[in-house]
Image (tube, rainbow, N blue to C red):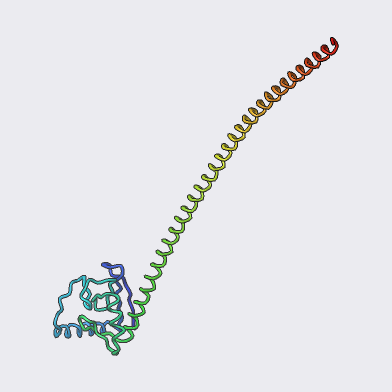
Amino acid sequence: MSSTIISNNPNNSDCIIISSSNSTSSRKRKHEEISKSSQNIIEIPVSNENCAICLEKRRRTFTIECQHSFCLKCIEVFLYNENNYIITCPLCRYEFDQGEKELYLKIINLKYKIREERKQKILDKIKREFNEEIVMVEREEEDKIINIKRNAKKNRTAIHKKYLKRKKEEEKKEEKLLNELRNSNKNEKQKLFEEKEKAIKLLEEKFNNT
């Protein structure tokens, strides 16, 4: 009976360990083969934190059944480029077949998909928060514009009231001056009329005495 186990590595949240075998004896045989083959391999000094393919610090760790870990991208490229039916671990030559390779690639694609979904959620959240900030700024700007318009209206009203008051005062002054001018003209006319009457009276007296 075949079984597949997918588990998370406790040392890295991005790490996935894949286990696939037909039986306990088959698994034992594989590990014995690994032990034998590893005796003939020249060991490459690789830090526990480094990828055995690129020899740099692992990024997004991916662990295969033999417990060796690699960068997710490195192992993906390695698997895509391996066309042989039997594929070996880049570090210990542990053997796995095309079926396991396809399983690894499916899980790698799934990890990419999950990563993209998380990334999209974060981007959506940032956009939503940014849009909310834009709306808040627009509301603040709108409030400022409303206040400016309201203050301008108050100022116009105050200026208009001052203008009306000043106009009324000027009209009163003009009316007063006109009244004074009318009275002055009236007095002048009265004086002229009296002088005219006086002159006529003197002429009449003069003619009467001759």
Quarter of the picture holding the N terminus = bottom left
| Left or right relative to 157: residue 132 | left
Q: Quadrant of residue 102?
A: bottom left
**Residue 121 image position (x, y, % from top left):** 42, 65
| Left or right relative to 125: residue 184 | right
**Residue 189 image position (x, y, % from top left):** 74, 22
Residue under the point 62% across and 30% down: 170
Q: In the image as oriented, which residue stretches furthest toward the top?
A: 209
Residue under the point 65% across and 29% down: 174
Question: 136 or 39: nearer the eye?
Answer: 136
Position of residue 159 relative to residue 21, above or below, is above
Quarter of the picture holding the C terminus = top right
| Left or right relative to 30: residue 126 | right
- Count the labels in the image: 0
Question: 33 or 115: nearer the eye?
Answer: 115
**Residue 143 image position (x, y, % from top left):** 51, 48
Residue under the point 24% across and 72% down: 58
Position of residue 58 relative to residue 98, above or below, is above
Position of residue 206 relative to residue 13, above or below, is above
Q: In the image as oriented, which residue stretches furthest toward the front?
A: 210
**Residue 95 image position (x, y, % from top left):** 25, 85
Q: Quadrant of residue 9?
A: bottom left
Question: 55 or 203: nearer the eye?
Answer: 203
Q: Quadrant of residue 125?
A: bottom left
